[in-house]
Image (cartoon, helix red, strand yellow):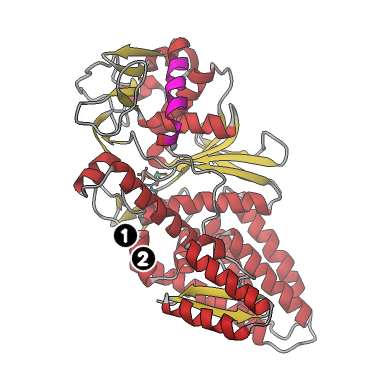
């Protein structure tokens, strides 16, 4: 069966073909790290996590890059306003990099808790300043940028003549100029030759904190540049999938596409499939930090298990808008309960003599793959899995080997959706935590291996005092935060 994905570049579902046999290279736009991750952000990251997991399930290797924006994303899309990171740092009387360090730590912790697969690289904009300056130089050499008063702008009209702009979403520059969706309202042009031109490098005001030396001025990069530079650096001139939220369909991604072509003077598309995830709304409005109508991941994790949140995300198609509510989470809790009850029923079932569940196992695998191949139709795959549970619960008198196979299948397919059901194996998750706790867990495990139980138990009690509960089982140990 072949995976089809909806490509915003061509505005249609297309059969997915990897550029390199067996390897899929993905770039996902990540967090602007000035504040906490909210449910909308997490829903988008969960979509790309499922994409990553599903591709692996189908046998591909995946190399996944998700950037972290720590400079250059301004409060106004049209290259005006304050840097979001710098503004938030000033409000909290922190050094911008102090804020970034704190927020990055928190982001990783929450991404881990939400069972998002770790990406291969999480590059940060501030770590790629040299590459960004070089990229601006290349764009200028190739004739697609001009300097004005220490800032450098991308020449959109020239690019449009040669390569077509914005192209993503099937639109043209002319259509944007006459229709809605652009940013051509009669704004002051300042140094730009055309309102569509966008900043590659911005000369910093004297009071600006985050600034770097460049051939043009003491300044900082335009937001779109980092994704081009880091995508090219880690994934190359032509990679498979670029993903982001629908808010990136214009202007972030067309600008990025244009930059890639202009930096490398490409005569081919830089990315084969552009994927966009719809927004989570609250009472019909986009959940966003600027609107203040958001739920942070950390506040939800205080009340709900990560698996409930992941079930909620998987119940929404990535291209459907969905309203967030606590009732919707409670619905997901019910689904999760059904999965868990079914697994428990299997464990508790006696060895029967029937084998009619075998067909259901084959059927659910087929149904799951068919749904996921259809542009990652996760709500359909969830309902197929719920149907599978209903059938299992009616057929608990099957042979033990078949029941076990049903259990493994359910766990495996839920895992593709990022919903973790398996028992943790020895040492699992230990690498995700505080190094001090990890060391204690590892020492305790070594002591147990040597049958020095008294000391091992003492460490277990100490860990409990630190809020870490440890349980031992045949598969190894599992730990969790006691609060
Ligand atoms: P930001 O930190 O604003 O740059 O956003 C990080 C990622 O979250 C981007 O891919 C956005 O498109 C996505 N995003 C932001 N708000 C929402 C929302 N309400 N629903 C879904 N995705 C969102
Ligand atoms: Zn981006």
Q: Position of residue 366 (x, y in %)?
A: 70, 59
Residue 300, numbered label: 2
Q: Quadrant of the C terminus?
A: bottom left
Secondary structure under the numbered disc 2 in the rendered image:
helix
Residue at 44% over, 64% down: 309
Q: Is residue 169 visible?
A: no
Disc 1 crowd, CA 10 A, few/some/many (<14, 14-19, 20+): some
Which residue in the structure is indicated by mark 1?
A: 295
Q: Is residue 126 above or below residue 404?
A: above
Q: Is residue 432 above or below residue 343?
A: above
Q: Residue furthest bottom?
A: 350
Q: CA distance from mark 2 to mark 1?
A: 7 Å
Q: Nearer the viewer, residue 191 or 93?
A: 93
Q: Is residue 415 above or below residue 474?
A: above
Decide if residue 398 is on the left or right side of residue 51: right
Q: Position of residue 352 (x, y in %)?
A: 76, 87
Q: Are marks 2 and 1 in contact (CB under 8 Å)?
A: yes
Residue at 44% over, 16% down: 137
Decide if residue 426 is on the left or right side of residue 141: right
Secondary structure under the numbered disc 1 in the rendered image:
loop
Magenta extent: 127-139
The answer to if 186 sits in the magenta stretch is no
- Number of labels in the image equals 2
The answer to if 137 sits in the magenta stretch is yes
Residue at 53% over, 74% down: 479
Task: For ligand 2, give the image quadrant.
Answer: top left
């Amino acid at each position: 069966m072949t995976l089809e994905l909806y490509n915003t570049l061509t505005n249609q579902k297309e059969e997915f073909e990897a550029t390199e046999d067996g390897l899929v290279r993905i770039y996902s736009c990540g967090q602007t790290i000035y504040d906490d991750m909210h449910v909308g952000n997490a829903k988008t990251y969960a979509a790309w996590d499922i994409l990553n997991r599903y591709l692996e399930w189908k046998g591909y290797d995946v190399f996944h890059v998700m950037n972290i924006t720590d400079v250059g994303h301004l409060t106004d899309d049209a290259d005006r306003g304050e840097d979001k990171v710098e503004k938030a740092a000033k409000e909290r009387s922190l050094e911008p990099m102090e804020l970034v360090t704190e927020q990055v730590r928190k982001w990783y912790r929450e991404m881990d808790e939400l069972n998002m697969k770790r990406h291969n690289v999480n590059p940060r904009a501030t770590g790629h300043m040299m590459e960004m300056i070089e990229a601006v130089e290349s764009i200028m050499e190739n004739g697609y940028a001009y300097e004005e008063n220490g800032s450098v702008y991308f020449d959109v009209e020239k690019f449009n003549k040669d390569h077509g702009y914005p192209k993503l979403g099937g639109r043209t520059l002319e259509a944007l100029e006459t229709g809605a969706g652009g940013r051509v309202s009669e704004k002051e042009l300042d140094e730009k030759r055309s309102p569509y031109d966008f900043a590659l490098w911005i000369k910093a005001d004297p009071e600006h904190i985050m600034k770097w030396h460049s051939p043009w001025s003491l300044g900082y990069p335009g937001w779109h540049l980092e994704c081009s530079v880091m995508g090219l650096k880690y994934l190359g001139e032509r990679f498979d999938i670029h993903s982001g939220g629908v808010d990136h369909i214009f202007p972030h991604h067309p600008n990025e596409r244009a930059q890639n072509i202009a930096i490398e003077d490409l005569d081919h598309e830089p990315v084969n499939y552009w994927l966009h995830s719809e927004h989570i709304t609250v009472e019909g409005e986009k959940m966003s930090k600027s609107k203040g109508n958001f739920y942070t991941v950390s506040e939800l994790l205080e009340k709900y298990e990560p698996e409930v949140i992941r079930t909620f995300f998987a119940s929404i198609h990535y291209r459907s808008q969905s309203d967030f509510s606590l009732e919707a989470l409670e619905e997901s809790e019910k689904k999760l309960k059904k999965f868990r009850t079914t697994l428990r029923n299997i464990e508790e079932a006696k060895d029967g003599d029937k084998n009619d569940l075998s067909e259901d196992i084959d059927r659910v695998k087929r149904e799951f793959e068919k749904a996921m191949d259809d542009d990652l139709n996760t709500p359909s795959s969830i309902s197929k899995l719920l149907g599978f549970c209903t059938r299992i619960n009616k057929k608990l008198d099957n042979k033990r080997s078949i029941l076990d196979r049903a259990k493994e299948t359910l766990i495996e397919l839920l895992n593709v959706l990022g919903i973790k059901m398996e028992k943790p194996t020895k040492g699992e998750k230990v690498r995700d935590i505080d190094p001090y706790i990890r060391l204690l867990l590892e020492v305790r495990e070594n002591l147990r291996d040597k049958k020095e139980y008294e000391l091992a138990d003492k460490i277990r009690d100490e860990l409990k005092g630190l809020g870490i509960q440890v349980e031992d089982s045949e598969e190894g140990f599992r730990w969790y935060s006691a609060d």
